[in-house]
C-alpha cells in the first residue's frame, strides 16, 4: 500500500508511560509530512514529465520509422528512375545508331548510284566524242578532197541548150 502525506499526518501513536515527548514527535512528523509531500509532488511531476518524454520518444520513433520508410521509398524511386533513364538512353542510342546506319547505307547506295550514272555518262561522252571525231574526220576528208575547177568540167557534162 502506497503511503501518502495524509497517512503520515493522520497517524496516531498510542501513549505510553515514559514515551517520547509528544510535541517533539508531532513537530518531527510535521517536518516529515512537509518533506514527504514535497517528494510526493516531485515524484508525480517527474512521472508526468517522464510520461510526456516517453510520448515524445514514441512520436520520434514513429517519425523515425516514417522517415526511414520514406527514405527507402525515395531510394527505390531514385533507383527505378535511374534504371529507367539508363534503359531509355540505351534505347535512344540504339535508335540513333540504327538511323545513322540507315543514313550511311542510303548515302552509300546513293554514291554508288551516282558513280554508276557518272560512269554511264562518261561512256556516252566517249561514244559521242568518238562519233563526233569520226564525223569531223569524214568532213575533213570531204573538205580535203580536191574540188573540181570549172575547167575540169568538160563540156560534155554540161547540159546543152
Image (cartoon, rainbow, N blue to C red):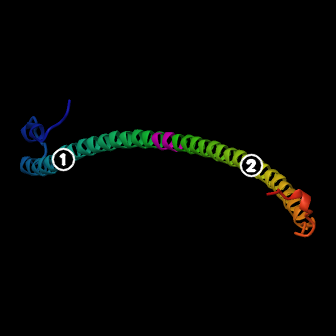
Q: Quadrant of residue 11?
A: top left
Q: Quadrant of residue 158?
A: bottom right
Location of residue 124 with respect to 69 vertically, above or below:
below
Residue under pointer 2:
117
Quarter containing the C terminus: bottom right
Residue at the image position 84 percent from the left and 57 percent from the top: 135
Question: Between marks 1 and 2, how big is the CA–CA gap?
Answer: 104 Å
Q: Which one is in front, 17 or 80?
A: 80
Q: Which one is in front, 52 or 159?
A: 159
Say how many tags the image has. Answer: 2
Where does residue 117 sit, x and y in percent of width and height?
A: 74, 48
* Residue 80 covered by magenta stretch: yes
Where does residue 118 sit, x and y in percent of width and height?
A: 76, 52
Residue under pointer 1:
45
Residue lying furthest front: 161
Where does residue 28 sit, x and y in percent of width and height?
A: 13, 51
Sequence-wise, which precedes: disc 1 or disc 2?
Answer: 1
Residue at the image position 9 percent from the left and 39 percent from the top: 6
Magenta segment, which residues?
Answer: 77-82
Camera-near label (1 vs 2) is 2
Question: Residue 128, labelled with which disc?
Answer: none
Identify the main secondary structure in magenta. Answer: helix
Q: Is residue 77 left or right of residue 17?
A: right
Where does residue 131 sit, x and y in percent of width and height?
A: 84, 54
* Residue 18 covered by magenta stretch: no
Q: Is residue 90 left or right of residue 138?
A: left
Q: Tell me the element at label 1.
A: helix
Amino acid at each position: 500500500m502506497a503511503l501518502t502525506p495524509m497517512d503520515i499526518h493522520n497517524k496516531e501513536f498510542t501513549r505510553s508511560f515514559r514515551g517520547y515527548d509528544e510535541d517533539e514527535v508531532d513537530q518531527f512528523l510535521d517536518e516529515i509530512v512537509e518533506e514527504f509531500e514535497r517528494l510526493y509532488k516531485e515524484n508525480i511531476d517527474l512521472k508526468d514529465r517522464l510520461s510526456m518524454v516517453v510520448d515524445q520518444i514514441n512520436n520520434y520513433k514513429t517519425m523515425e520509422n516514417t522517415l526511414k520508410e520514406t527514405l527507402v521509398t525515395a531510394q527505390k524511386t531514385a533507383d527505378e528512375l535511374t534504371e529507367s533513364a539508363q534503359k531509355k538512353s540505351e534505347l535512344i542510342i540504339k535508335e540513333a545508331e540504327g538511323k545513322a546506319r540507315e543514313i550511311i547505307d542510303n548515302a552509300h547506295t546513293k554514291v554508288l548510284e551516282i558513280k554508276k550514272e557518272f560512269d554511264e555518262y562518261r561512256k556516252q561522252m566517249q561514244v559521242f566524242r568518238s562519233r563526233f571525231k569520226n564525223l569531223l574526220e569524214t568532213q575533213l576528208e570531204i573538205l580535203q578532197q580536191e574540188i573540181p575547177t570549172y575547167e575540169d568540167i568538160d563540156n560534155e557534162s554540161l547540159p546543152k541548150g
